[in-house]
Amino acid sequence: MKGVVAFITLAILFTSCVSSRQPNYTFNQKYSAEDLQSDIVLLKKILEANHPSLYWYTPKDSMDYYFDKAIASIKDSLTEIQFRNKVASVISKIRCGHTSVRFSKAFSHISEKYRYPQFPLYFKVWDDSLVVLGSAFPRDSIFKRGVIVTSINGKTNRQLLDSMFDIISTDGYSDNYKNQVVSNNFPSWYRSVYGLDSFYTIKYIDAGGKEAVTTIKNFAPAKDTLRKKDTTLRKFIPAFVTPTKKQIRQSKLLDKRSMQIDTSINTAYMRITSFSGGRLRKFFRRSFRTIKEKQIENIVIDLRENGGGNVELSTKLAKYLKNKPFKSGDTVAAITRTFPYRSHIKNWWMYWFPMNVFAHKKSDGRYHYTHFEKHYFKPKTNNHFDGHVYIIQGGVTFSASTMFISTMKGQGNVMVTGEETGGGFYGNTAMHLPYIELPKSHIRVGLPMYRLVIDSTREKNGHGIIPDVWIKPSSIAIKKGVDIKLQKIRQIIIDRKKAIGAN
């Protein structure tokens, strides 16, 4: 034990002495071709040494081809954005959502201070559809919410999305994750791929149902607009501008989780946007106690915004709903417990310790986290819910939230609704998630350490969880500003009550 403590102490001291700061950094600066090529060569070596699912969906010869092609394509210096796109294009071929690419810390820090010109429209994206969510121009008379766009600058919707999707990582072939990521910030993805133009020629469907075309300009936000607005507001509504610490804490908690009860249909609506933080254990305990006290018959669990988090917390929620013992997965395995390129893996020692204590080598040559493979979690007896459960999922439903739905799907009183998840139904690569920082460009790449097979009897087809009831987006619903998924579930609950009453 003394040796372990000494190791951890030295590792902490060593880590604290390593600085990732980039001296004299210029925003989106260029790097030489030689430096960038060396970064990609090193990245490939690190992934080959540690990534447990590098060839899970894409064979080795294909991945070798993608890496070699990227290296050969770098013939001159590139900006950080250009290089990040090249790396992201290669990494997306691994088809692992946790192996994603981020800009350097210096880039991310400085970019917050800039307010660039941008493509002015925001879209809801699905299939080949681009439907306007809003315009940066408040008086835009054409591109109002719900308008359907068919092309931008001569490129079809499919061409635009394929170019953006090429630099976004997801589990397997679940492109619905990419749909939602682009929906969250279309202008940013457009700028990353296509840069900026002064004007955009846009084809759209007009009010008469016919295709029309118009030209719009970039939106250039005025500097300090928000700051001036806040100064004005502070004079008249100081309480709004300066919330108390308690109000801030409550707001942050509500942003993570909330519960409302619709007494008209005897239904609790639970929204959980993350399985990290949010005092979820206390929230679950209080919520299910209230549900039992009020004799609630239905629960709607909305996980559309939930990108995952702590597996223990998603398991905690499942205990209140699952009707039999369950486990996290059939296989949780790493290919190694060592870090040959540790100087380029941030805080590697934090992962080395649990992997060397809790993971054990088996006959397949991999290191298995046997606790997750063998341990069955028992449903709670106190305040367990046995009524009807409706789960809403979407493209960014990922990782731990996908594991929760995977546990619940197929239970008699559970209905999964919405769209395909971004997280894989068969499994994913995650659990421990350090990241690589490349030495020349300082681009960061996620490095999941364990391959998780949730249920080995399922088909490994690369898809997310398919809902029992599909509820796709609708341009009409977007135009009206209504939540079509909640509307549909509400109607299902009402129809079920009527059917019971009729019998």
Image (tube, rainbow, N blue to C red):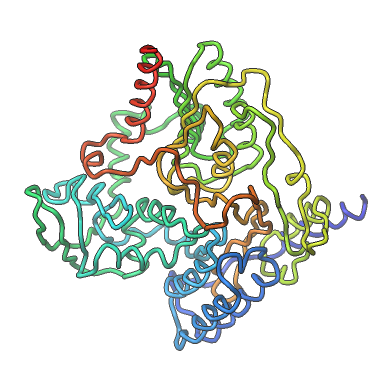
Is the residue 128 above or below the residue 340 in the image? above
Q: Position of residue 442 (x, y in %)?
A: 56, 70
How many numbered tags mark residues here? 0
Quadrant of residue 112 in the image?
bottom left
Q: Residue at left 44%, top 22%?
A: 260
Vertical side of 262 occupied by 326: above or below: below
Q: Residue reaching furthest right?
A: 2
Q: Is residue 85 above or below residue 377?
A: below
Question: Which residue of the protein is positioned furthest toward the front in this rendering?
Answer: 503
In percent of the image, x 47 and y 36: which residue is there? 416
Q: Residue at x 78, y 48 (%)?
A: 370
Q: Residue at x 79, y 64 (%)?
A: 365
Q: Quadrant of the C terminus?
A: top left
Q: Is residue 216 left or right of residue 127?
A: left
Q: Nearer the viewer, residue 480 or 172?
A: 172
Q: Quadrant of residue 428?
A: bottom right
Could you tell me residue 207's position as x and y percent?
9, 47
Q: Position of residue 5 (x, y in %)?
A: 87, 51
**Relative to residue 399, is residue 494 depicted above or below?**
above
Compare residues 392 and 480 and report the one nearer the observer.
392
| Left or right relative to 112: residue 459 | right
Q: Which x, y percent locates residue 312? A: 66, 38
